[in-house]
Image (spheres, grey):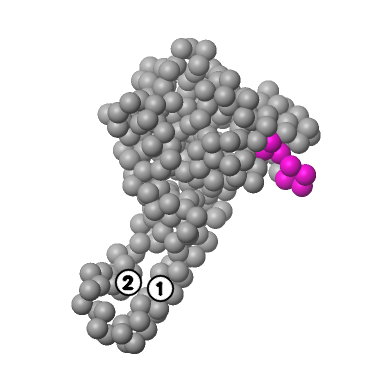
Amino acid sequence: MKAAISISELAASIMALPGPVVMMDTCSVLDIIRAGHRADVSSLVVPAAAAFLLAANPPARRGWIVALPQVGTEWARHCAQEGSELRNKITEAEILIEKFHSAAGIVTPYLTITFSALRSQTVDASLVALSESVMNCAEVLSPEQELMMRALERSLRRDAPAHKGGSIEDCVIVEHYMELTSVLRASKFTDACVFVSSNSRDFGPAGSPLPPLDAQFSSMGLEYVKDLSRARTRINQLAGSQII
């Protein structure tokens, strides 16, 4: 990950080179790997991640990816496990398709790709690498004391994303992202600000955040979507053209 900087520093950089801002939690980065095998994660997350990676890299920057240090820490803790799970699913699929070929050889001519080909292309390693590249491309916000206190107060009130028995981490994330959005909007920033998370349990269904997040996000123009594919679609919709 990059070195962490303050919200004011990042806001100044964004205002100097405006473009849509995508704010990630750990789930949204791990979903790049999960897209290879989980039915509840769209495969379109993969090309969207590649598009955001391209857009957020200088010199032709067209957008920004933002994360907090704990997002990188949590990603590092789980990425190997997610990659291993994908590899196991590919292996299981290889076995099933081989059995299918044996039982119904007549189907073989109609199959244009085999799972052996997928294995040789190391799909799991490629998706882990893409996820890591997105993580390393992100601008990292330094935790700020006032916002940490707001996160603690939110957690004590059990305001979403807090809940009984949960950690404070999601509250820390949401307080910092809301503050960044507020600072940008106060500077007349008009591009999309999008929070990406598939953690519907804590944040609510995509597009319908739990209270009081619904009112807070709406008041500052912070969009909430499930994954990078939906973030890409929403940003392009708001722009009126395909900018990502």
Which residue is rendered at x = 50% and y = 55% of the image?
Answer: 40
Residue 173 percent coordinates (x, y): 60, 35
- The kind of residue tagged 1 is Ala
Q: What residue type is labelled 2?
A: Phe
Q: Which residue, as the protein is rendered here, is positioned at the far bottom? A: 103
Identify the residue at horizontal 43%, vertical 52% (top origin). Answer: 42
Horizontal side of 90 relative to 74 (left or right) equals left
Q: Is residue 145 at least partly visible in the picture?
A: no
Q: Is residue 224 above or below residue 86?
A: above
The magenta stretch is 160-166
State the image coordinates of residue 157 (x, y, percent, origin top left): 78, 32
Give SS at disc 1.
helix
Determine which residue is flagged by label 2: 115
| 170 part of magenta stretch | no
> SS class of the residue under badge 2?
helix
Q: How many labels does the image show?
A: 2
Query: Is label 1 in contact with label 2 (beta carbons under 8 Å)?
Result: yes
